[in-house]
Amino acid sequence: MTKKIAVLPGDGIGQEIVTEAVKIIDCLQTDFDFKVELEEALVGGSAFDDCGSPLPESTMQLARQADAVLLGAVGGHKWEALDIAVRPEKGLLGLRAGLGLFANLRPAILYPQLADASTLKPEIVADLDIMIVRELTGGIYFGQPRGVRTLKNGEREGFNTLVYSEPEIRRIGKVAFDIAAKRNKRVCSVDKANVLECTELWREVMIDEADNYPEIELSHMYVDNAAMQLVRAPKQFDVMVTTNMFGDILSDAAAMLTGSIGMLPSASLDENGKGMYEPIHGSAPDIAGQGVANPLATILSVAMMLRYSLDEAALADRIEAAVRNVLDQGLRTQDIFSDGMRKVGTSEMGDAVVSAMRQ
Ligand code: IPM
Ligand code: MG
């Protein structure tokens, strides 16, 4: 049966970058004997504008039925004043939770062609290749109770709960160890075990689970130190595994090591390898609609989709090679532009990747 991809462009630059990613999928269909069905739906602020919910039931149903989900980005200034329950971000969180996408893989790879685009010295970041494994459906993002309450004295107090069950920790640990087994066999688990009981348990469970992976070297780091080490000596890391919120923060920092957050894809996987694929950057409302956003993170997300959910590793390689090719040609969107290169817009970049794939 033909596999189905749910295409959810979302908000801001989401539409523009997903259009380019779809060009790549179309090229796979016309030139590479690959067949897939695409169906588009609304999510985030655009869905809220359409029907009052950032995650309409029809979108959720499509995502459930599909073999994989391709997502652009959600959010924007326009919706910031909305009640938190219907903000665009809830659409994304609802997809993650509803589909059980607990394992978020965020590779931070420095393309040698972009060494100059990093704000760090080239020798610190050259050949960087880190995989951040972020727990995605638990922790403080989802913990109950949560809210803002008014105390007897009339003062308000906001509260959230950081909670992880042992199975939740163990399953994300397994994902990290399995990935490391195919890489350099080192996992650094990031926690705040010196202060937070929840992550004390996290550390304990990681140590216990590591017994099943004798070939993997497990180390531990407190999150504050990990943030520092990421910018001091990032190449010490192979796979990092951490909680939902720490992973959110550390993956943005890691992204910047590679020059631009506009280059980094991500995969969010469930227990069976079904996944949602999205760039790790947001909806960038400041540049939305201008045709200048970098589509490469979304295009590389399609490559991850082929590799992790659609069992088409050779096609994934092909896309990644095409991206390296356009960088070699000197094509740069504004976020990765440097002197001597040729500045291109979103669609020109997408077209260039398609041509490179055909070569
Ligand atoms: C990310 C984003 C999201 C998150 C937002 C948009 C809810 O920052 O995917 O990193 O915090 O997880
Ligand atoms: Mg984030």
Image (cartoon, rainbow, N blue to C red):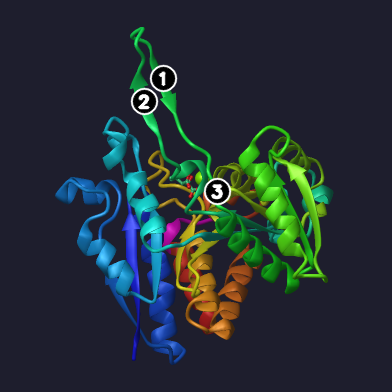
Q: Nearer the viewer, mark 2 or mark 3?
A: 3
Residue of label 2: 148
Kindly check if marks 2 and 3 are in contact, taking CB atoms under 8 A apart as contact.
no
Residue 356 in the image: state x and y as whole percent. Answer: 55, 77
Kindly check if marks 2 and 1 are in contact, taking CB atoms under 8 A apart as contact.
yes
Q: CA distance from mark 2 to mark 1?
A: 6 Å
Could you tell me which residue is drawn at 26 percent across and 49 percent down?
Answer: 54
Q: Nearer the viewer, mark 3 or mark 1?
A: 3
Could you tell me which residue is drawn at 42 percent across and 40 percent down?
Answer: 144
Label whose residue precedes the other's in the sequence (3 or 1): 1
Tag 3 secondary structure: loop
Res. 233 in view:
yes
Q: Amino acid at mark 1?
A: Glu
Instruction: Give the answer, above or below, for where 84 lies relative to 265.
Output: above
Q: Which residues are magenta?
A: 343-347
Mark 2 residue CB less than 8 A from any atom of ligand 1: no
- Nearest to the observer: residue 185 or residue 115: 185
Could you tell me which residue is drawn at 57 percent across and 59 percent down?
Answer: 167
Task: Count residues near mark 1 (Cα–Cα under 10 Å), then give few for <14, some for 14-19, many for 20+.
Answer: few
Res. 164 mark: 3
Quadrant for the N terminus, please.
bottom left
- Nearest to the observer: residue 328 or residue 102: 102
Could you tell me which residue is drawn at 59 percent across and 72 percent down?
Answer: 320
Which image quadrant for residue 184? bottom right
